[in-house]
Structure formats: C-alpha cells, structure tokens
Amino acid sequence: MRDAFLSGRIWAFPNLLIIYTQSSSLRNHTSE
C-alpha cells in the first residue's frame, strides 16, 4: 500500500511540473 502511494507521488510530481510550466508559458504568451 505504502509503495503504491510513493510511486503515485513520484509519478504525479513531473506531471504537476509539466502542467505548471505549460500554464506559466501560457500566461506569459497572453501577457505579451
């Protein structure tokens, strides 16, 4: 159970990073 939780967090982190960079780049694009 705990291993699945850890692997889930490890998998979610890069996805959150990608979403964050995409949304920030989108915001910069509209602000120009």
Image (tube, grey):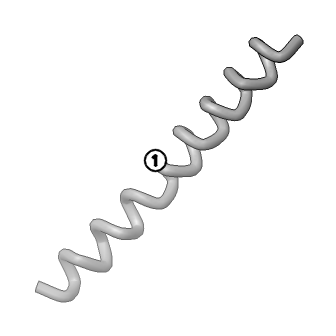
Q: Report the residue at 23% width, 77% height from top.
A: 5
Secondary element type, mark 1: helix
Could you tell whether 11 is left or right of 21 in the image?
Answer: left
Residue furthest front in the image: 31
* Residue 2, x across and y down, in percent: 19, 88
* Residue 18, x across and y down, in percent: 56, 41
Q: Is residue 21 above or below residue 13?
A: above
Query: Which residue is tagged 1?
Result: 15
Front residue of this view, candidates 32 and 6: 32
How crowded is the residue under tag 1: few (<14 C-alpha within 10 Å), some, or many (20+)?
few
Q: Is residue 21 above or below residue 31?
A: below
* Residue 9, x across and y down, in percent: 36, 69
Three-letter code, disc 1: Asn
Could you tell whether 10 is left or right of 6 in the image?
Answer: right
Q: Report the residue at 39% width, 57% height from top.
A: 12
* Residue 10, x across and y down, in percent: 41, 68
Q: Quadrant of the N terminus?
A: bottom left
Q: Quadrant of the C terminus?
A: top right
Q: Report the residue at 70% width, 34% height from top.
A: 24
Could you tell whether 14 is left or right of 6 in the image?
Answer: right
